[in-house]
Amino acid sequence: MRGLLLALALAFGAMSPVGLAGCASLQAVQPQSAREVLAEAEIAFVGVVTVASDAYAVGAISQEDAQALVRRFDEVAGYLNTARLLLAAGDEAGANRTLAVARSVIRVLSIELSRRAEAHRNGTPA
């Protein structure tokens, strides 16, 4: 159990500077450039990792589910890193394609975590 919390914390810690920087702006603005989309995706990723860590800590998700989430988080982190590298190489179109995949996975994870949190609040199995 402690290992999973550590893995979730490490996933959060890898992205936390971006998440903290994102707190400076509170107004919702639609991202325009690939760099803005990357920043938005990183902030969303931090949020999902935080929710997952909290859900695991309160027993809303099982150890097995947490392990599966850590694998998905690694996948998303890979997409975000690839997009960052593509941007650095000047391939904005490639970065946008990679970010579209990353944002889709983040959205799916967010929906699943919301469903599990609701089930946990209602005392029903997820």
Image: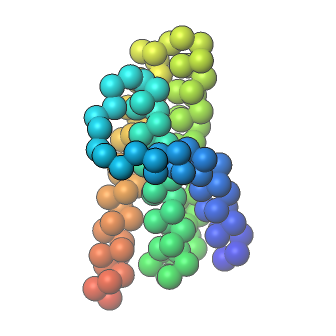
Farthest bottom residue?
Answer: 123
Q: Toward the viewer: 23 or 61?
A: 23
For the point 57% across and 74% down, the residue is 63
Q: How is the image coloured?
A: rainbow
Residue sticking out furthest to the front: 24
Vertical arrangement, residue 34 with respect to residue 40, above or below:
above
Residue at 51% x, 63% y is 50
* Residue 123 image offset from top left, x and y in percent: 32, 88
Q: How many marks?
A: 0
In the rendered view, tell whether residue 62 sits above or below residue 113.
below
Residue 53, quarter of picture:
bottom right
In the image, residue 37 sits, relative to residue 56, either above or below, namely above
User: Which quadrant does the N terminus fall into?
Assistant: bottom right
Q: Residue at x 31, y 46 (%)?
A: 27
Residue at screen point 59% across, 51% down: 16
Residue 72 is left or right of residue 113, and the answer is right
Residue in front for this viewpoint, 77 or 38: 38
Residue 67 showing in the rendered view: yes
Question: Residue 107: where, in percent of width, then height?
Answer: 35, 49
User: In front here: 111 or 16?
Assistant: 16
Looking at the figure, which quarter contains the C terminus?
Answer: bottom left
